[in-house]
Image: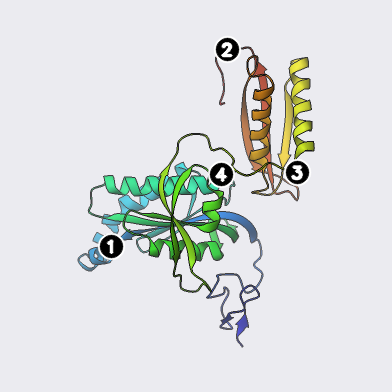
Amino acid sequence: MAKTCERCGASAGDDARFCPSCGAPLESIAGAERKLATMVFADLVDSTELAADLDPEELRGRLAPFFEMARSTLEEHGGTVEKYVGDAVMAVFGVPRAHGDDPDRAVAAALELTRRVDLMRTGLSLRVGVETGEVLALDGEGDLSVTGDAVNAAARLQQAAGSGEVLVGERAARACRTAQLEDVGPIGAKGFPAPLRAWRVVRVDGAEPRATTPFVGRDDDLALLELVYRRAARDRVPELVTITGDAGVGKTRLASELTDRLRSLDPRRRRFSGVTHRTVAGSPSGRSVRSSARPRAPGRTPTGPT
């Protein structure tokens, strides 16, 4: 008996576990979690011709340096390789560990990987697709599996990209704060009801990203954090603050707004240093950020990360 996907309404075979159209699971999977993640799909251009001239062992030897470079580059930026498919690599940012800037990390990793492949001077080049969205993640004994619309969208964006090009989907483009993007218009995408909007990555700025959206509805939270800071500064005793919330709700933005607020209130007398640690929280919030900061006299050299 055929199954029907609850998300998109497409039909699937009675033995199918995932929707062939949108990638959503057709039945509940024990241990799987819904996460907001950014997917990166990178594929070597014209490698089919290379494969035609080599036997499988020789081909694997030629591709091994690329696979190792892709793994190291993606991991350097905080990503996790989910799988290798032929001469392609699929990676995820935000699973199993989420950061406040996963789309920026993914785009920076994709651009850096294309640069490194060019420097290999093997005659091969890379094309990459990046998209953000809700996925279903299953992490079983180190074997990570991720499915969802963002996975399929990243793959379609990669197929539409040119040699050496990184294309970013709409949701990832909206979330990026450090990348300069160029609108390339909609692209046809098999399996999607409408064309996907895409942006070409021009470059990634090294400067600290600045928020472009208004900061609203968090006045009470900001006032409470400011009060904690003033007490720590007055008593010269460190204070520990834990900010919890689902990925993407604005934990990093709240901390950034606090830092900006304190600099504007007293730009001459105080600077701030501290250490930030992210870990999985045992509460419904899902994520926890713990930060410790201390005021120090002007002119002193920082002793920790800023």
Whole-angstrom CA distance, mark 1 to mark 3, is: 51 Å
10 Å crowding of disc 2: few (<14), some (14-19), many (20+): few
Judging by the rendered image, the residue that carries numbered circle 1 is: 47
Q: Horizontally, is 137 left or right of 127 in the view? A: right
- Give the distance between the C-alpha atoms of the residues marked 2 and 4, in whole angstroms: 30 Å
Which residue is label 2 attached to?
300
The quarter of the picture where residue 184 lies is bottom left
Q: Is residue 203 above or below residue 233?
A: below
Three-letter code, disc 2: Arg
First along the sequence among labels 2 and 4: 4
- Give the Cα distance between marks 1 and 2: 55 Å
Quarter of the view holding residue 231: top right
Q: Which is nearer the N-term, disc 1 or disc 2?
A: 1
- What element does badge 2 sit on? loop
At label 3, counting other C-alpha atoms closer than 10 Å, the crowd grade (few under 14, some 14-19, many 20 or more) is few
Q: Residue at x 55, y 71 (%)?
A: 22
The residue tagged with tag 3: helix, strand or loop?
A: loop
